[in-house]
Image: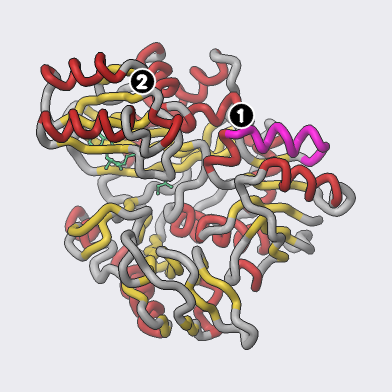
Amino acid sequence: MNVMVVGGGGREHAIIKAIRKNPEVKDIYALPGNGGIAQDAICVNVDAEDLDGVVEFVRGHKEVIDFAVIAPDDPLCMGMVDAVEAEGIPCFGPNKDAAIIEGSKAFSKDLMKRYDIPTAEFETFTDMDDALEYVQTCKIPVVVKASGLAKGKGVLICETREDAVQAVKTIMEDKVFGASGDTVVIEEFLEGPEVTVLSFTDGKVLIPMISSMDHKRAGDGDTGLNTGGMGVVAPNPYYTEEIAQQCEEEIFLPTMIAMNKEGRTFKGCLYFGLMLTEDGPKVIEYNCRFGDPEAQVVLPLLDSDLLDIMKHVHDGTLEDADVRFARDEATCCVVMATEGYPGKYGKGFDIYIPDDIKDHVYVAGADLAEDGHLLSNGGRVLGVTERGKDIREAIDKAYESVSKIKFDHGFYRHDIGQRALKAL
Ligand code: AMP
Ligand code: GLY
């Protein structure tokens, strides 16, 4: 059995390592993968966002590929699942009609409003003057969001009215996110702990995975610039059994049902970004895929077979799948990034990872040198994940592994998981 995985970051490495555990799997093709993934898969030099290139590869390899996983947001939103399935290869991931739940915030906010799913109050604008008028009188702080995909950067939190005016202009006039900013969503600023819950769903049943807590800021103590994520722990201690129950009833199942009613049945990993406000849990965002780095803490806690679950999701038989997480254990992922990230950073720095921890290191941005060591080639470079009997043990083990890695010009946060420990 051979599998194709589209994508080339830490999330894809975590997915590939999990799929590798299935004894029937022979070859895994990663498009494009990276130098770290190359140690677990055959990397094919086709960009994840090159729809025609991916389809061409599939056409040439129909006989050898049995199943495909389309992991990142852009390919899903451009309809890669539809295109690959049209070639006869079954995929894990939502089709284009369903991926819109991430691809258009205007769509997802409207969906939540119409189906009574709790989220921040909002208005949607396609005309800049209307948006500018609105921010003159709305409550402050306020959050201005490009409706479309923006590589995770399209959300601007505005503490003042001037900031809000600037945010609207940045998105709608300067078009820094291109056409993704043709529509903006302006929404109420919410407060409370944030929780991510990934779920498997085939449109009939929805199985939440273990909750997690991201660390977005670059520096210790949640200081510095926002990043793609500097570390994660799972489970998230704020996400109690009671809140989980409430989320299932008020958010998760209603979302699955709403998508069915819209004729946009979602099959794949549905990501719920939640804020636990004083008025209860509310949706901050939906993603149509595994989160990165969230996948790097959630998948290592999966004790059953990921590929088997993915096939059940595709077949619409998730009800019959064996989905087992180590619910009484914990994981911690510490991201190692290149000095300068999320600003300017250099490339080609040497990285040495001892063999005994290689299995727990997910590579996000590195090339493979001839002698087998890695050369940095990205902002976020490694995700080092360890599993423990509780969060404290997972944190200690993760930092112990980090200390064994030699990475010239690398840096990492020293306090991943501390917020979670305090909450306990
Ligand atoms: P998103 O890209 O939608 O996940 O937003 C990025 C981050 O912005 C979230 O993880 C939150 O921390 C923050 N955020 C988004 N929307 C809101 C909101 N309505 N109120 C407060 N913070 C928000
Ligand atoms: N970690 C957030 C995301 O994957 O969008």
As drawn, the residue found furthest toward the bottom would be 371
Can the viewer see residue 131? yes
Residue hosting label 2: 117
Residue hosting label 1: 96
Q: Is residue 373 left or right of residue 90?
A: left
Residue 163 in percent (x, y) is at: 15, 35
Q: Residue at x 46, y 24 (%)?
A: 255
Between residue 345 and residue 399, name the one nearer to us. 345
- Kindly identify the amino acid type of the residue bearing the numbered disc 2: Ile
Q: Residue at x 55, y 60 (%)?
A: 14
* Helix, strand or loop at mark 2: loop
Dividing the image into 4 quarters, which one contains the N terminus? bottom right
Residue 80 shown in magenta: yes
91 lies above or below 397? above
| Number of residues whose C-alpha sits closer than 10 Å to that of mark 1, classed few (under 14), some (14–19) or many (20 or more) | many
Residue 45 in percent (x, y) is at: 69, 60
Between residue 51 and residue 209, name the one nearer to us. 51
* Helix, strand or loop at mark 1: helix
Q: Which mark is residue 266?
A: none
Residue 400 in percent (x, y) is at: 36, 80
222 lies above or below 90? below
Residue 164 shown in magenta: no
Quarter residue 231 falls in: bottom left
